[in-house]
Amino acid sequence: MSQSTTQHHHDPITDQNREKILQAAASEIHRCGFQAASIANILADTGLTKGALYHHFPSKQQLGLAVVDEVIHASLEQRMFAPLRTADNPVDTLLDYMQFRGEAMTDEAIKLGCPLNNLTQEMSPLDDDFKGHLNQILQMWQSVIEQALIKGQAQGQIRPDVDCSAAALFIVSAWEGCWGMAKNRQSVEVFQLCLSQLRNYVLNLGPGHA
């Protein structure tokens, strides 16, 4: 449908500007952290005015929370949560994803670190709203992996004695720890080693590994 036949012809442009701001803010926050993130840099990246930014996001905090919900959470939802929820064999899907993340890791990604992990470390002690939004993602992640393991138990891939809730908490914690250690060392190899050990942990939840 062309803009001329759209009833609210200005809406696509407005939505496009909002998305531009959101993506530019996500990049700036990923590079610099939330507190050091510069509104001027975000505007320079988008070519928009301060008025346009504050029209969509009345405060820097609201912009940051939108990045958490609509960029970081949405990315994890698309790449990991949804595929695990819908997989016929979610344990294999989880193992395959771990292998893929290790193989696809780049120096640039390690340099900047995991956006979720970065903001959790930076903002959770400082801002209850950030802590709440970030915790929601971590709890969702834990829940999705817990359900994957429970389904794996029903399919005979995970031992019946495994506490799926505790195992899921450990997997999420260790995964984020892999990111933190690799960023600290600035080493793709460290990330790959950590994640391969975590993958072995999941494999060892299977029958015959008690």
Image (cartoon, rainbow, N blue to C red):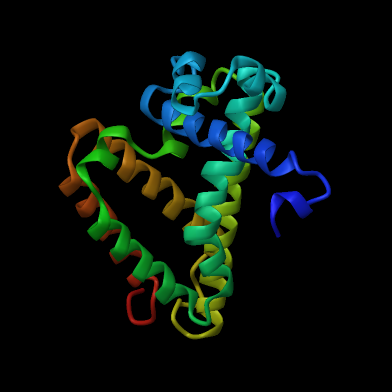
Q: Quadrant of the N terminus?
A: bottom right
Looking at the image, which residue sits at the far bottom? 155
Residue 57 placed where, x, y %? Answer: 67, 25
Q: Answer with left or right where residue 21 lies relative to residue 194.
A: right
Residue 204 placed where, x, y %? Answer: 33, 70
- Residue 71 visible? The answer is yes
- Residue 134 visible? The answer is no
Q: Relative to 209, does residue 115 appear above or below in the rendering?
A: above
Q: Quadrant of the C terminus?
A: bottom left
Residue 74 placed where, x, y %? Answer: 57, 50
Q: Answer with left or right where residue 158 lies relative to residue 15.
A: left
Residue 131 placed where, x, y %? Answer: 60, 30
Question: Which residue is drawn at the image coordinates 52% and 68% (left, top)?
Answer: 84
Question: Which residue is drawn at the image coordinates 42% and 67% (left, top)?
Answer: 94
Looking at the image, which residue sits at the far right? 7
Q: Which one is nearer the viewer's eye here, 156 or 148?
A: 148
Q: Answer with left or right where residue 52 lies relative to residue 107.
A: right
Q: Answer with left or right where residue 2 lies relative to residue 166.
A: right
Q: Relative to 93, does residue 172 appear above or below in the rendering?
A: above
Q: Which one is nearer the viewer's eye here, 171 or 9?
A: 9
Question: Which residue is drawn at the image coordinates 32% and 42% (left, top)?
Answer: 179
Q: How many marks do you count on the picture?
A: 0
The picture quadrant where one finds residue 49 is top right
Looking at the image, which residue sits at the far front? 4
Q: Which one is nearer the viewer's eye here, 7 or 151?
A: 7
The picture quadrant where one finds residue 143 is bottom right
Q: Relative to 95, does residue 43 appear above or below in the rendering?
A: above
